[in-house]
Image (cartoon, helix red, strand yellow):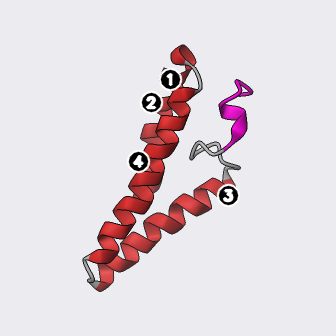
Amino acid sequence: MAFGAVNLLIGLVVLAVAAEHGGAVVGVGAVILALIAFGGGACLIALRRPWTKGLGIGLMIGWALLSITSVGFCTGLNPEMYTGGI
C-alpha cells in the first residue's frame, strides 16, 4: 500500500512534467520508482528483522505486481509512454 501511494505521487508529477518536456522524463521517473522499490527493499531486507524483511520483499513484489496489472503504465515500463502514444 505504501508503494502504491508513492507511485501515485511520482506518477502524477512525471506525467505533468512529461506533457511539457517529452518522454525522457518518463524514463527518469521509471528509474526512480525502480530504485525506491528495489533499493529500499534491499535495505529493509538487510536490516534482518522479520517485519523489515516482509516489508522489503513486499516493496519489490508490489512494484512487480503493479507493473503487470497496469501493463507498465504505472511504473513507466510501457514503450507507448516514450513514443507519445498516450
Q: Secondary structure at mark 2?
A: helix
Distance in Å between CA atoms under marks 3 and 2: 21 Å
Q: Going from the N terminus, do you reach mark 2 or mark 4 first?
A: 4
Q: Which amino acid is tagged 3?
A: Ile
Instruction: Please state if 2 lies on the left or on the right of 86 as rendered.
Output: left
Q: Earlier in the sequence, mark 1 or mark 4?
A: 4
What's the CA distance linking mark 4 and mark 3? Answer: 17 Å
| Distance from the alpha carbon under mark 1 to that under mark 3 | 23 Å
The image position of residue 73, as x and y in percent, is 64, 42
Give me the residue at 53% from left, 68% from top.
61
- Can you say which quadrant of the picture contains the N terminus? bottom left
Q: Indicate which disc residue 68 carries.
A: 3
**Which region shows up in magenta?**
78-86
Q: Amino acid at mark 1?
A: Ala
> Which residue corresponds to mark 2?
13
Q: Earlier in the sequence, mark 3 or mark 2?
A: 2
**Residue found at the far top of this picture:** 20
Sequence-wise, which precedes: disc 1 or disc 3?
A: 1
- Which badge, 4 or 3, is on the more N-terminal residue? 4
Number of residues whose C-alpha sits closer than 10 Å to that of mark 3, classed few (under 14), some (14–19) or many (20 or more): some
Q: Quadrant of residue 44?
A: bottom left
Q: Is residue 10 above or below residue 23?
A: below
Circle 3/circle 2 CB separation < 8 Å: no
Disc number placed over residue 16 in the picture, else none: 1
**Residue 22 in view:** yes
Crowding near the residue tagged with mark 4, few <14, some 14–19, many ≥20 C-alpha atoms within 10 Å: few
Q: Is residue 68 magenta?
A: no
On the image, which quarter does residue 45 sit in? bottom left
In this picture, is 82 found above or below 44? above
Q: Which residue is mark 4?
A: 6
